[in-house]
Image (cartoon, rainbow, N blue to C red):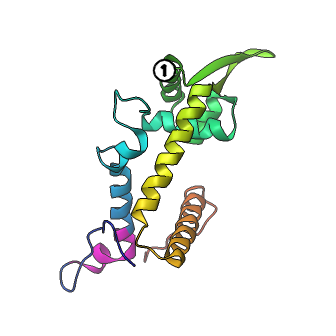
Amino acid sequence: MARVATVARGGVGSASPDEAGPVARLGRAWQRLRRSAADDGVGAELVGRPGEPGHVDPVQLDVLDLLAVRDGQRMSELAAAMRVDPSTITRAMHRMEAAGLASRRPVAADGRVVTAHLTAAGRRLHGLVIQRRAEVIRAAMVDFTAEEQERLADLLEHFLGALVASANGSGPQPTAAG
């Protein structure tokens, strides 16, 4: 399998088994993936550069993703889905409203409840980011066979499902041995 960018991998005698094992390798890959979302490389290809048209910060992108699937969510639902403090959503929504990407509306039956909604501009920006994401992923997998692409997607989906289940206490729990 060709690799566009590899994560440091211990060779014979160069690292302890823990540092070269799959858990450590996945940990380093996770770090690189998270950092790339915030750097000037891959992240900028996905979310644009600050000040440029089409730029969206990662928190705003998460809100766009959630509202694109189900518009009209309560602010508290967005905070829970993103596992952040409600004030984080409030600040993001202020910026998104100022940029014309989203709006907040009180619920008629209960004026204390506010829901978030995408605007047409927010939907367009979300579509642009989805297109950018697909282009970045296609470019990264250009040397992967179709079977390798399917296997990678299957394994990543399986891993993320197990990760979420474990974090929620409903999946396999690690033992003292590993």
**What residue is shown at x 39% (from left), y 59% (from top)?**
30
Which residue reaches farthest right?
109
Q: Quadrant of the N terminus?
A: bottom left
Residue pictured at 28% horizontal, 73% vertical = 19
In this rendering, the answer to whether 168 lies above or below 73 is: below
**As drawn, 86 above or below 173:** above
* Left or right, residue 169 beside residue 57: right
Residue tagged by mark 1?
A: 99
Q: Quadrant of residue 12?
A: bottom left
Observer able to see residue 173 = no
Q: Position of residue 81 (x, y in %)?
A: 60, 41
Which residue occupies 54% across, 78% down? 147
Picture coordinates of residue 51 (x, y %)?
A: 34, 26
| 164 lies above or below 144 | above
Q: Main secondary structure of the magenta part?
A: helix
| Residue 48 shown left or right of residue 6 in the figure | right
- Say few, some or many: other residues with alpha carbon within 10 Å of mark 1 (under 14 / 14 to 19 / 20 or more): few
Amino acid type of the residue tagged 1 in the rendering: Ala
In terms of secondary structure, where does tag 1 sit? Answer: loop
Q: Position of residue 53 (x, y in %)?
A: 41, 29
Q: Give the percent coordinates (x, y) of residue 135.
A: 46, 53
Q: Quadrant of the C terminus?
A: bottom left
Q: Magenta segment, which residues? A: 15-25
